[in-house]
Image (tube, grey):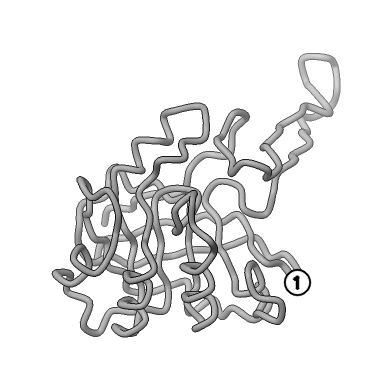
Amino acid sequence: MRIFDISVPLASGLPSWPGDPCLLLEPVLQLEKGDGARVSRITLGDHSGTHLDTPAHMLENGATLDGISLSRLMGRALVADLRGCGEIGLSELQGLPLAGEERLLLRTDNSSLWTKPDFCPDFVALNPEGAEYLLSKGIRLVGIDYLSIESFKGDGSVHRTLLGNDVVILEGLDLSEVPAGVYELVCLPLRIAGGAGAPARAVLRQF
């Protein structure tokens, strides 16, 4: 059984959304300096790297991490290969076999952006029409391979459409090695009490 780790490594220099805290790894204890162990201080935002967006991220009274069932984050998931698309809308989504699917992961040209040290604002994103279409098809979790499901120039409407209708968003994936198809998703976010989001380890297993 093949397992794909679709989480980006948490390492110094990881691209972050403008204005969000940058990831910092600072050694506190070091064996090389005669300390009895290696211990580091990690500073990061709750939307660093591979992470989950909950409704509370954009909605004042939205559900936090405490209200997201782990069953939503584990189970059958469809990976769609949309490389070559500049934007994901109705025409890009209509040809996908979404009947009966609840979890959709969008592989785009974004996955190659993780090799660049700086944030890239011109990433591929879901547009409002595409968000409405996913709602109509019963999608309950949607993931994408960069730091936001929504365009850098977006007004938040894509997030509000999805999160306001109880669709969980999984952002910051690396799908560069994952062929299109159906997998089992296992996604475990950090258990942050009252969190609006959280870094997560996400993997795909072939059935």
Up/down of 41 relative to 72, above or below: above
At a point 55% along the width and 56% down the height, the residue shown is: 51
Q: Nearer the viewer, residue 113 or 9?
A: 113
Q: Quadrant of the C terminus?
A: bottom left
Q: Is residue 97 left or right of residue 18?
A: left
At a point 20% along the width and 45% down the height, the residue shown is: 84
**Outermost residue toward the left?**
95
> Mark 1 highlights which residue?
194
Up/down of 207 relative to 8, above or below: below
| Residue 71 on image: x %, y % | 49, 79
| Residue 170 on image: x %, y % | 48, 62
**Outermost residue toward the top?**
33
At a point 41% along the width and 56% down the height, the residue shown is: 203
**Which quadrant holds residue 40?**
top right
Q: Is residue 195 left or right of residue 37?
A: left
Q: Is residue 196 left or right of residue 183?
A: right
| Residue 121 on image: x %, y % | 47, 40
Could you classify mark 1 by the number of other residues whose Cα lies within 10 Å: few (under 14), some (14-19), or many (20 or more)? few
Q: Nearer the viewer, residue 117 or 103?
A: 117
Asked which secondary structure carries label 1, the reply is loop
Up/down of 133 relative to 2, above or below: below
| Residue 151 on image: x %, y % | 44, 53
**What's under tag 1, amino acid-wise?**
Gly
At a point 52% along the width and 39% down the height, the residue shown is: 9
